[in-house]
Image (cartoon, helix red, strand yellow):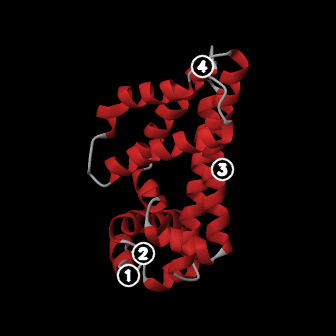
């Protein structure tokens, strides 16, 4: 890794924390420069503007989430689809804790506004959530094949479970409630929703 690429990584790391905690509008390049020790000219050497920094963070977040989920799930074997669902939920919560700043950005209003108006942001957001949705859906399909999950619409049910677990992450990220304290109850609720009649 070259010196400049280390500097670029440091800029991205600091910007991720600032965007997550202060928001996009309230993060200023002078502050990023001060934190990283990089002159503003150096920041703009690596990135066209503040929006380009955010898009780079979003793209890197997408790659990290997709890679981490793929590696984690490929390393495991599951007896049933329901067991697979338990693991998808658990790993989602683990990953959200490990990537707290990135998940705070994903849950922020500013990123959704940018995704509504700019194709590059929308494509990255869709890729992230489609990847996650696919893992939940695959667990349901696998469970329907082995009989551990009932006759539910796989895509819609996956979306409901993803929305619920993302809500737990939101509670935790905004210090509203400890998501870990609700893990067992959450898993039981998901099982009840998906179990065969």
Q: Which residue is mark 2?
A: 24
4 or 3: tag closer to the N-terminus: 3
Q: Residues within 10 Å of mark 2 (few under 14, many from 20)?
A: many
Q: Which mark is residue 96?
A: none
Kind of element beneath mark 2:
loop
Q: Residue furthest bottom?
A: 41
Q: Quarter-wise, where is residue 36 in the image?
A: bottom left
Residue 126 visible, this orientation: yes
Q: Which residue is mark 3?
A: 130
Q: Position of residue 71 (x, y in %)?
A: 63, 34
Q: Quadrant of the C terminus?
A: top right
Kind of element beneath mark 3:
helix
Q: Residues within 10 Å of mark 1 (few under 14, many from 20)?
A: some
Q: Quadrant of the N terminus?
A: bottom right
Q: Are discs 1 and 2 less than 8 Å apart at CB?
A: no
- Nearer the observer, disc 3 or disc 1? 3
Q: Position of residue 70 (x, y in %)?
A: 65, 37
Q: Which residue is mark 1?
A: 28
Q: Residue furthest front?
A: 197
Give the alpha-carbon distance from disc 4 to disc 1, as whole Å: 53 Å
Q: Quarter-wise, where is residue 186 in the image?
A: top left
In this view, the residue in front, 83 or 65, is 83
Q: Quarter-wise, where is residue 85 in the image?
A: top right
Looking at the picture, does residue 177 appear above or below residue 74? below
Seen at 46% across and 43% down, the residue is 164
Give the alpha-carbon distance from disc 2 to disc 3, as whole Å: 24 Å
Give the alpha-carbon distance from disc 2 to disc 4, as whole Å: 45 Å
Seen at 60% across and 19% down, the residue is 196
Q: Which residue is mark 4?
A: 196
In this view, the residue in front, 177 or 32, is 177
Seen at 68% across and 64% down, the residue is 123
């Amino acid at each position: 890794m070259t010196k400049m690429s280390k500097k670029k990584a440091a800029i991205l790391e600091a910007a991720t924390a600032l965007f997550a905690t202060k928001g996009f509008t309230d993060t200023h390049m002078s502050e990023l420069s001060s934190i990283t020790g990089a002159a503003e000219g150096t920041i703009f050497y690596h990135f066209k503007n503040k929006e380009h920094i955010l898009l780079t963070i979003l793209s890197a977040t997408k790659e990290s989430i997709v890679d981490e989920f793929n590696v984690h799930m490929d390393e495991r074997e599951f007896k049933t689809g329901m067991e697979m669902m338990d693991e998808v939920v658990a790993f989602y919560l683990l990953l959200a804790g490990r990537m707290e700043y990135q998940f705070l950005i994903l849950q922020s209003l500013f990123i959704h506004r940018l995704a509504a108006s700019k194709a590059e942001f929308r494509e990255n957001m869709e890729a992230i959530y489609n990847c996650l949705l696919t893992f939940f859906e695959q667990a349901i399909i696998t469970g329907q094949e082995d009989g551990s999950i009932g006759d539910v619409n796989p895509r819609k049910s996956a979306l409901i479970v993803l929305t619920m677990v993302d809500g737990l992450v939101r509670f935790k990220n905004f210090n509203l409630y400890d998501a870990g304290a609700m893990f067992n109850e959450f898993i039981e609720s998901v099982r009840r929703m998906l179990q065969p009649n």
